[in-house]
Amino acid sequence: MMKRILLFMAIVMAIFSSQDVARAASVDEAGKMLVVYYSYTGNCRQIVESLTAQVEADVMEIEPAEKGLHYEANNYALGTQLLNAINAAPNDAASYPAIDPVPITDLSGYDNIIIVTPLWWSQMAAIMQTYLFHYGPQMAGKHVGLIVSSHSSGISQVVADAKRLVPSAVWMGDALWIKASNHANRAALIQNWIASLDFAAGATAAVDQLYITIGGVTQQATLVDNAATRELVTRLQEAPVTVTLNSSGGFEIWGPLGFALPTSNEQVNAQPGDIVLYNGSNICLFYGSNSWSYTRLGHIDGLTESQLRTFLKAGESNISVTLSITAPAAGIKGDVNGDGEVSIGDVSALIDVLLGGHTDTAMADVNDDGEVSIGDITKLIDILLNGESA
Ligand SMILES: Cc1cc2nc3c(=O)[nH]c(=O)nc-3n(C[C@H](O)[C@H](O)[C@H](O)COP(=O)(O)O)c2cc1C
Protein backbone atom coordinates (compact mmCIF):
# COMPACT_ATOMS: atom_id res chain seq x y z
CA MET A 1 0.00 0.00 0.00
CA MET A 2 2.77 2.37 1.02
CA LYS A 3 4.57 1.64 -2.24
CA ARG A 4 1.44 2.55 -4.18
CA ILE A 5 1.08 5.86 -2.35
CA LEU A 6 4.73 6.71 -2.99
CA LEU A 7 4.37 5.80 -6.65
CA PHE A 8 1.23 7.94 -6.93
CA MET A 9 3.00 10.89 -5.28
CA ALA A 10 6.01 10.46 -7.56
CA ILE A 11 3.73 10.54 -10.63
CA VAL A 12 1.89 13.64 -9.38
CA MET A 13 5.20 15.40 -8.65
CA ALA A 14 6.57 14.43 -12.04
CA ILE A 15 3.51 15.87 -13.76
CA PHE A 16 3.72 19.13 -11.80
CA SER A 17 7.46 19.58 -12.25
CA SER A 18 7.26 18.85 -15.98
CA GLN A 19 4.54 21.52 -16.29
CA ASP A 20 6.78 23.93 -14.44
CA VAL A 21 9.66 23.24 -16.77
CA ALA A 22 7.39 23.80 -19.77
CA ARG A 23 6.22 27.17 -18.51
CA ALA A 24 9.49 28.53 -17.19
CA ALA A 25 11.60 30.50 -19.61
CA SER A 26 14.76 32.55 -19.66
CA VAL A 27 14.42 36.25 -20.20
CA ASP A 28 15.04 35.79 -23.94
CA GLU A 29 12.03 33.51 -24.27
CA ALA A 30 9.88 35.40 -21.77
CA GLY A 31 6.33 36.30 -22.67
CA LYS A 32 4.94 39.79 -22.53
CA MET A 33 6.27 41.80 -19.60
CA LEU A 34 5.07 44.79 -17.61
CA VAL A 35 7.27 46.82 -15.28
CA VAL A 36 5.19 48.80 -12.80
CA TYR A 37 6.85 51.24 -10.44
CA TYR A 38 6.45 54.10 -8.04
CA SER A 39 9.23 56.54 -7.30
CA TYR A 40 9.14 59.50 -4.94
CA THR A 41 12.74 60.72 -5.10
CA GLY A 42 13.76 59.14 -8.40
CA ASN A 43 15.79 56.08 -7.33
CA CYS A 44 13.19 53.54 -8.47
CA ARG A 45 12.84 55.42 -11.75
CA GLN A 46 16.58 54.99 -12.34
CA ILE A 47 16.28 51.32 -11.43
CA VAL A 48 13.51 50.94 -13.99
CA GLU A 49 15.67 52.63 -16.63
CA SER A 50 18.48 50.16 -15.94
CA LEU A 51 15.99 47.29 -15.96
CA THR A 52 14.32 48.19 -19.25
CA ALA A 53 17.72 48.61 -20.87
CA GLN A 54 18.01 44.85 -20.30
CA VAL A 55 14.49 43.50 -20.81
CA GLU A 56 11.73 44.31 -23.26
CA ALA A 57 8.75 45.48 -21.26
CA ASP A 58 5.89 47.93 -21.13
CA VAL A 59 6.43 50.39 -18.31
CA MET A 60 3.81 51.97 -16.09
CA GLU A 61 4.45 54.54 -13.37
CA ILE A 62 2.06 54.84 -10.45
CA GLU A 63 1.43 58.36 -9.25
CA PRO A 64 -0.35 59.65 -6.17
CA ALA A 65 -3.55 61.56 -6.86
CA GLU A 66 -2.48 64.31 -4.48
CA LYS A 67 0.55 66.10 -5.87
CA GLY A 68 3.30 68.00 -4.11
CA LEU A 69 3.14 66.12 -0.81
CA HIS A 70 6.32 65.81 1.26
CA TYR A 71 6.19 62.32 2.70
CA GLU A 72 9.53 62.77 4.44
CA ALA A 73 8.78 66.13 6.09
CA ASN A 74 8.62 66.35 9.89
CA ASN A 75 10.60 63.18 10.38
CA TYR A 76 8.61 61.29 7.73
CA ALA A 77 5.33 62.17 9.43
CA LEU A 78 3.07 61.92 6.39
CA GLY A 79 4.64 58.71 5.06
CA THR A 80 4.24 57.17 8.50
CA GLN A 81 0.63 58.33 8.76
CA LEU A 82 -0.24 56.74 5.41
CA LEU A 83 1.35 53.43 6.39
CA ASN A 84 -0.35 53.45 9.79
CA ALA A 85 -3.73 53.87 8.12
CA ILE A 86 -3.04 50.84 5.89
CA ASN A 87 -1.77 48.75 8.78
CA ALA A 88 -4.86 49.56 10.84
CA ALA A 89 -7.26 48.23 8.18
CA PRO A 90 -5.37 46.57 5.30
CA ASN A 91 -8.52 45.08 3.76
CA ASP A 92 -10.33 48.41 3.53
CA ALA A 93 -9.86 50.28 0.24
CA ALA A 94 -10.39 53.56 2.12
CA SER A 95 -7.15 52.96 4.06
CA TYR A 96 -5.05 53.41 0.94
CA PRO A 97 -3.97 56.84 -0.42
CA ALA A 98 -5.60 57.66 -3.77
CA ILE A 99 -3.58 57.19 -6.94
CA ASP A 100 -4.09 58.58 -10.44
CA PRO A 101 -6.03 56.31 -12.81
CA VAL A 102 -3.57 53.90 -14.42
CA PRO A 103 -3.19 53.70 -18.21
CA ILE A 104 -3.15 49.89 -18.24
CA THR A 105 -6.16 48.51 -16.42
CA ASP A 106 -6.27 45.06 -18.01
CA LEU A 107 -3.28 42.88 -17.12
CA SER A 108 -4.56 39.79 -18.90
CA GLY A 109 -2.13 40.22 -21.80
CA TYR A 110 0.94 40.09 -19.55
CA ASP A 111 2.79 36.89 -18.67
CA ASN A 112 5.40 38.53 -16.44
CA ILE A 113 5.21 41.55 -14.15
CA ILE A 114 8.05 43.23 -12.29
CA ILE A 115 7.12 45.55 -9.42
CA VAL A 116 9.66 48.21 -8.46
CA THR A 117 8.97 50.04 -5.21
CA PRO A 118 10.66 52.15 -2.56
CA LEU A 119 10.73 51.01 1.07
CA TRP A 120 9.11 53.33 3.58
CA TRP A 121 9.62 52.63 7.25
CA SER A 122 10.60 49.07 6.36
CA GLN A 123 7.29 48.60 4.51
CA MET A 124 6.18 48.91 0.90
CA ALA A 125 5.67 52.59 -0.02
CA ALA A 126 1.99 53.40 0.55
CA ILE A 127 1.37 54.56 -3.04
CA MET A 128 2.49 51.23 -4.50
CA GLN A 129 0.39 49.43 -1.91
CA THR A 130 -2.68 51.25 -3.26
CA TYR A 131 -1.92 50.07 -6.79
CA LEU A 132 -1.40 46.47 -5.71
CA PHE A 133 -4.49 46.54 -3.50
CA HIS A 134 -6.55 47.22 -6.63
CA TYR A 135 -4.60 45.36 -9.32
CA GLY A 136 -2.73 42.65 -7.39
CA PRO A 137 -5.63 40.21 -7.78
CA GLN A 138 -5.28 40.47 -11.57
CA MET A 139 -1.72 39.15 -11.20
CA ALA A 140 -2.95 35.77 -10.00
CA GLY A 141 -1.04 33.00 -11.75
CA LYS A 142 1.35 35.42 -13.45
CA HIS A 143 5.09 35.31 -12.89
CA VAL A 144 5.86 38.31 -10.70
CA GLY A 145 9.19 39.74 -9.55
CA LEU A 146 9.92 42.43 -6.97
CA ILE A 147 12.68 45.02 -6.73
CA VAL A 148 12.88 47.12 -3.58
CA SER A 149 14.91 50.27 -3.14
CA SER A 150 15.76 51.44 0.38
CA HIS A 151 18.35 53.61 1.98
CA SER A 152 19.66 50.79 4.15
CA SER A 153 16.79 48.90 5.82
CA GLY A 154 16.21 45.26 4.96
CA ILE A 155 13.23 44.41 2.78
CA SER A 156 11.56 41.40 4.42
CA GLN A 157 8.45 43.39 5.40
CA VAL A 158 8.11 44.76 1.85
CA VAL A 159 8.19 41.19 0.56
CA ALA A 160 5.46 40.31 3.09
CA ASP A 161 3.39 43.29 1.91
CA ALA A 162 3.77 42.14 -1.70
CA LYS A 163 2.63 38.63 -0.79
CA ARG A 164 -0.39 40.02 1.07
CA LEU A 165 -1.38 42.30 -1.83
CA VAL A 166 -0.60 39.84 -4.65
CA PRO A 167 -1.61 36.63 -2.94
CA SER A 168 -1.76 34.34 -5.96
CA ALA A 169 1.32 35.39 -7.90
CA VAL A 170 3.94 32.89 -9.00
CA TRP A 171 6.98 34.64 -7.50
CA MET A 172 9.71 34.13 -10.02
CA GLY A 173 12.60 34.32 -7.60
CA ASP A 174 13.75 36.21 -4.51
CA ALA A 175 13.13 39.94 -4.43
CA LEU A 176 16.08 42.11 -5.45
CA TRP A 177 17.13 44.61 -2.80
CA ILE A 178 18.99 47.67 -4.04
CA LYS A 179 20.10 49.82 -1.13
CA ALA A 180 21.65 53.27 -1.44
CA SER A 181 25.22 51.99 -1.24
CA ASN A 182 24.49 49.60 -4.15
CA HIS A 183 22.43 51.97 -6.25
CA ALA A 184 25.32 52.92 -8.54
CA ASN A 185 25.94 49.23 -9.19
CA ARG A 186 22.27 48.55 -10.04
CA ALA A 187 22.78 47.53 -13.68
CA ALA A 188 25.00 44.58 -12.70
CA LEU A 189 22.73 43.61 -9.79
CA ILE A 190 19.71 43.64 -12.09
CA GLN A 191 21.55 41.60 -14.73
CA ASN A 192 22.41 38.85 -12.23
CA TRP A 193 18.93 38.90 -10.76
CA ILE A 194 17.24 38.62 -14.17
CA ALA A 195 19.42 35.63 -15.02
CA SER A 196 18.16 33.88 -11.88
CA LEU A 197 14.43 34.33 -12.58
CA ASP A 198 11.92 31.85 -13.95
CA PHE A 199 10.00 33.94 -16.44
CA ALA A 200 6.81 32.66 -18.00
CA ALA A 201 7.03 31.95 -21.69
CA GLY A 202 4.43 33.67 -23.90
CA ALA A 203 1.01 32.21 -23.27
CA THR A 204 0.43 31.88 -26.97
CA ALA A 205 2.79 31.89 -29.90
CA ALA A 206 2.73 35.21 -31.69
CA VAL A 207 -0.02 35.25 -34.28
CA ASP A 208 1.12 36.59 -37.63
CA GLN A 209 -1.62 35.20 -39.84
CA LEU A 210 -4.78 37.05 -40.78
CA TYR A 211 -7.64 35.62 -42.82
CA ILE A 212 -9.64 37.96 -45.01
CA THR A 213 -12.99 36.72 -46.28
CA ILE A 214 -14.92 38.52 -49.00
CA GLY A 215 -18.03 37.03 -50.57
CA GLY A 216 -17.22 33.52 -49.33
CA VAL A 217 -13.63 33.60 -50.59
CA THR A 218 -10.88 33.57 -47.98
CA GLN A 219 -7.31 34.69 -48.50
CA GLN A 220 -4.43 34.58 -46.04
CA ALA A 221 -2.36 37.59 -45.12
CA THR A 222 0.80 37.90 -43.06
CA LEU A 223 0.80 40.51 -40.33
CA VAL A 224 3.76 42.65 -39.41
CA ASP A 225 4.58 42.79 -35.69
CA ASN A 226 3.70 46.12 -34.12
CA ALA A 227 1.43 47.50 -31.41
CA ALA A 228 -1.42 47.86 -33.91
CA THR A 229 -1.35 44.24 -35.11
CA ARG A 230 -0.95 42.93 -31.55
CA GLU A 231 -4.04 44.86 -30.51
CA LEU A 232 -5.87 43.73 -33.65
CA VAL A 233 -5.00 40.09 -32.94
CA THR A 234 -6.22 40.47 -29.34
CA ARG A 235 -9.57 41.70 -30.68
CA LEU A 236 -9.81 38.99 -33.32
CA GLN A 237 -9.05 36.34 -30.69
CA GLU A 238 -12.38 37.34 -29.12
CA ALA A 239 -14.34 37.25 -32.39
CA PRO A 240 -13.89 37.90 -36.12
CA VAL A 241 -14.55 41.48 -37.19
CA THR A 242 -16.66 42.32 -40.24
CA VAL A 243 -16.21 45.73 -41.84
CA THR A 244 -17.81 47.42 -44.83
CA LEU A 245 -15.25 48.81 -47.23
CA ASN A 246 -15.48 50.95 -50.34
CA SER A 247 -13.26 51.26 -53.37
CA SER A 248 -11.39 54.49 -53.57
CA GLY A 249 -8.79 56.21 -55.69
CA GLY A 250 -8.44 53.30 -58.08
CA PHE A 251 -5.97 51.61 -55.74
CA GLU A 252 -7.69 50.40 -52.55
CA ILE A 253 -10.77 49.36 -50.68
CA TRP A 254 -11.00 51.04 -47.30
CA GLY A 255 -13.30 51.95 -44.45
CA PRO A 256 -13.66 52.22 -40.68
CA LEU A 257 -12.70 49.30 -38.45
CA GLY A 258 -15.12 50.46 -35.76
CA PHE A 259 -12.29 50.84 -33.22
CA ALA A 260 -8.90 52.52 -33.00
CA LEU A 261 -5.54 50.79 -32.99
CA PRO A 262 -2.20 52.18 -31.78
CA THR A 263 -0.50 54.03 -34.64
CA SER A 264 3.09 54.13 -35.75
CA ASN A 265 2.46 56.22 -38.86
CA GLU A 266 5.15 56.68 -41.46
CA GLN A 267 5.22 57.59 -45.12
CA VAL A 268 4.37 54.26 -46.76
CA ASN A 269 4.51 53.53 -50.48
CA ALA A 270 1.72 50.96 -50.33
CA GLN A 271 1.81 48.25 -52.98
CA PRO A 272 -0.82 45.77 -54.25
CA GLY A 273 -1.64 43.36 -51.42
CA ASP A 274 -0.58 45.71 -48.63
CA ILE A 275 -2.84 46.17 -45.62
CA VAL A 276 -2.46 49.40 -43.69
CA LEU A 277 -4.11 51.39 -40.95
CA TYR A 278 -5.13 54.90 -41.95
CA ASN A 279 -5.79 57.61 -39.40
CA GLY A 280 -5.76 55.13 -36.51
CA SER A 281 -9.11 53.49 -37.13
CA ASN A 282 -9.51 52.73 -40.85
CA ILE A 283 -8.27 49.69 -42.69
CA CYS A 284 -7.09 49.91 -46.31
CA LEU A 285 -6.52 46.88 -48.56
CA PHE A 286 -4.54 47.71 -51.68
CA TYR A 287 -4.94 46.41 -55.21
CA GLY A 288 -2.92 49.32 -56.58
CA SER A 289 -0.34 51.62 -55.02
CA ASN A 290 -0.40 54.85 -53.09
CA SER A 291 2.05 56.77 -50.95
CA TRP A 292 0.66 58.21 -47.70
CA SER A 293 1.14 58.29 -43.94
CA TYR A 294 0.00 54.88 -42.74
CA THR A 295 0.70 52.28 -40.08
CA ARG A 296 1.61 49.00 -41.73
CA LEU A 297 -0.53 46.02 -40.75
CA GLY A 298 0.47 43.31 -43.21
CA HIS A 299 0.27 41.95 -46.72
CA ILE A 300 -2.13 39.61 -48.53
CA ASP A 301 -0.13 36.53 -49.49
CA GLY A 302 0.50 35.26 -52.99
CA LEU A 303 -2.01 37.09 -55.20
CA THR A 304 -1.19 38.87 -58.44
CA GLU A 305 -2.45 42.37 -58.98
CA SER A 306 -5.33 41.16 -61.13
CA GLN A 307 -6.24 38.41 -58.61
CA LEU A 308 -6.22 41.10 -55.92
CA ARG A 309 -8.58 43.28 -57.97
CA THR A 310 -10.94 40.33 -58.29
CA PHE A 311 -10.70 39.26 -54.64
CA LEU A 312 -11.07 42.79 -53.28
CA LYS A 313 -13.93 43.61 -55.68
CA ALA A 314 -12.02 46.60 -57.01
CA GLY A 315 -14.34 49.42 -58.00
CA GLU A 316 -17.30 48.18 -55.95
CA SER A 317 -18.90 49.76 -52.89
CA ASN A 318 -20.26 48.35 -49.62
CA ILE A 319 -17.97 45.33 -49.72
CA SER A 320 -18.42 43.15 -46.65
CA VAL A 321 -14.96 42.06 -45.45
CA THR A 322 -14.43 39.70 -42.52
CA LEU A 323 -11.12 39.63 -40.66
CA SER A 324 -10.26 36.60 -38.55
CA ILE A 325 -7.21 34.85 -37.17
CA THR A 326 -8.56 31.35 -37.76
CA ALA A 327 -9.64 30.18 -41.17
CA PRO A 328 -13.43 30.39 -41.38
CA ALA A 329 -15.30 27.12 -41.81
CA ALA A 330 -15.91 26.31 -45.44
CA GLY A 331 -19.09 27.91 -46.73
CA ILE A 332 -22.07 25.99 -47.99
CA LYS A 333 -21.50 24.69 -51.49
CA GLY A 334 -23.96 26.43 -53.77
CA ASP A 335 -24.41 29.41 -51.41
CA VAL A 336 -23.02 31.62 -54.13
CA ASN A 337 -24.43 34.86 -52.73
CA GLY A 338 -23.11 34.02 -49.24
CA ASP A 339 -26.42 34.53 -47.42
CA GLY A 340 -26.03 31.30 -45.46
CA GLU A 341 -28.45 29.14 -47.45
CA VAL A 342 -28.85 27.65 -50.91
CA SER A 343 -31.86 29.23 -52.57
CA ILE A 344 -33.09 30.46 -55.93
CA GLY A 345 -31.15 33.70 -55.33
CA ASP A 346 -27.95 31.71 -55.74
CA VAL A 347 -28.87 30.84 -59.31
CA SER A 348 -28.87 34.48 -60.34
CA ALA A 349 -25.68 35.03 -58.30
CA LEU A 350 -24.11 32.12 -60.16
CA ILE A 351 -25.20 33.51 -63.53
CA ASP A 352 -23.61 36.76 -62.39
CA VAL A 353 -20.36 34.94 -61.71
CA LEU A 354 -20.56 33.26 -65.10
CA LEU A 355 -21.05 36.59 -66.79
CA GLY A 356 -18.02 37.92 -64.97
CA GLY A 357 -19.78 40.39 -62.73
CA HIS A 358 -18.90 38.60 -59.48
CA THR A 359 -15.99 36.74 -58.04
CA ASP A 360 -17.31 34.26 -55.52
CA THR A 361 -15.60 31.41 -57.27
CA ALA A 362 -15.12 29.10 -54.27
CA MET A 363 -18.82 28.68 -53.60
CA ALA A 364 -19.74 29.12 -57.26
CA ASP A 365 -17.73 26.07 -58.31
CA VAL A 366 -20.71 24.03 -57.17
CA ASN A 367 -19.69 20.80 -58.90
CA ASP A 368 -16.10 21.11 -57.69
CA ASP A 369 -14.50 20.68 -61.11
CA GLY A 370 -12.11 23.57 -60.52
CA GLU A 371 -13.89 26.11 -62.70
CA VAL A 372 -17.13 28.03 -62.82
CA SER A 373 -19.08 26.91 -65.85
CA ILE A 374 -22.58 26.11 -67.05
CA GLY A 375 -22.24 22.69 -65.35
CA ASP A 376 -22.39 24.45 -61.99
CA ILE A 377 -25.88 25.74 -62.75
CA THR A 378 -27.06 22.18 -63.37
CA LYS A 379 -25.49 21.10 -60.08
CA LEU A 380 -26.99 24.04 -58.23
CA ILE A 381 -30.47 23.28 -59.56
CA ASP A 382 -29.87 19.68 -58.51
CA ILE A 383 -29.11 20.86 -54.98
CA LEU A 384 -32.18 23.09 -54.98
CA LEU A 385 -34.51 20.35 -56.21
CA ASN A 386 -33.09 17.43 -54.26
CA GLY A 387 -31.78 19.22 -51.18
CA GLU A 388 -28.40 17.68 -51.93
CA SER A 389 -25.47 19.67 -50.61
CA ALA A 390 -21.89 18.96 -51.52
C1 LIG B 1 8.46 58.20 3.81
C2 LIG B 1 9.80 57.53 3.63
C3 LIG B 1 10.22 56.58 4.53
C4 LIG B 1 11.43 55.92 4.34
N1 LIG B 1 11.82 54.97 5.24
C5 LIG B 1 13.00 54.32 5.07
C6 LIG B 1 13.42 53.33 6.01
O1 LIG B 1 12.75 52.99 6.96
N2 LIG B 1 14.61 52.72 5.78
C7 LIG B 1 15.41 53.01 4.72
O2 LIG B 1 16.46 52.40 4.59
N3 LIG B 1 15.02 53.94 3.82
C8 LIG B 1 13.84 54.61 3.98
N4 LIG B 1 13.44 55.56 3.07
C9 LIG B 1 14.32 55.85 1.93
C10 LIG B 1 13.86 55.21 0.66
O3 LIG B 1 13.50 53.86 0.82
C11 LIG B 1 14.96 55.26 -0.37
O4 LIG B 1 15.48 56.55 -0.49
C12 LIG B 1 14.49 54.82 -1.74
O5 LIG B 1 15.60 54.66 -2.59
C13 LIG B 1 13.51 55.82 -2.35
O6 LIG B 1 13.11 55.42 -3.63
P1 LIG B 1 12.54 56.53 -4.65
O7 LIG B 1 13.66 57.52 -4.89
O8 LIG B 1 12.23 55.79 -5.91
O9 LIG B 1 11.37 57.18 -4.02
C14 LIG B 1 12.25 56.24 3.25
C15 LIG B 1 11.84 57.22 2.35
C16 LIG B 1 10.62 57.86 2.56
C17 LIG B 1 10.19 58.91 1.56
Image (cartoon, grey):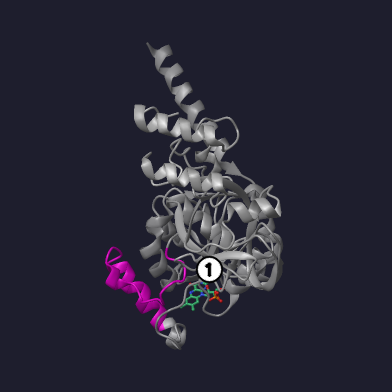
Residue 105 location, quadrant:
bottom left
* Residue 274 falls within the magenta-colored stretch: no
Q: Residues within 10 Å of mark 1 (few under 14, many from 20)?
A: some
136 relative to 16, above or below: below
Residue drawn at x 44%, y 86% is 67
136 relative to 103, above or below: above
Q: Which residue is mark 1?
A: 282
Side (left or right) of 255 relative to 270:
left
Count of all numbered marks drawn on residues in the image: 1
Residue 51 lies, in percent from the top left, at 64, 64
Residue drawn at x 47%, y 31% is 378
Q: Is residue 113 visible?
A: no
Q: Is residue 16 visible?
A: yes
Rendered-image quadrant of the N terminus: top left
Residue 156 lies, in percent from the top left, at 48, 58
Ligand 1 closer than 8 Å to label 1 CB:
no
* 82 or 375, nearer to the observer: 375
Side (left or right) of 133 relative to 220:
left
Residue drawn at x 66%, y 56% is 273
* 332 or 282, nearer to the observer: 332
* 352 or 44, nearer to the observer: 352
Residue 38 lies, in percent from the top left, at 50, 72
The amino acid type of the residue labelled 1 equals Asn
* Residue 82 falls within the magenta-colored stretch: yes
Rendered-image quadrant of the C terminus: top left
* 76 or 176, nearer to the observer: 176
100 relative to 27, above or below: below
Q: Which residues are magenta?
A: 77-105
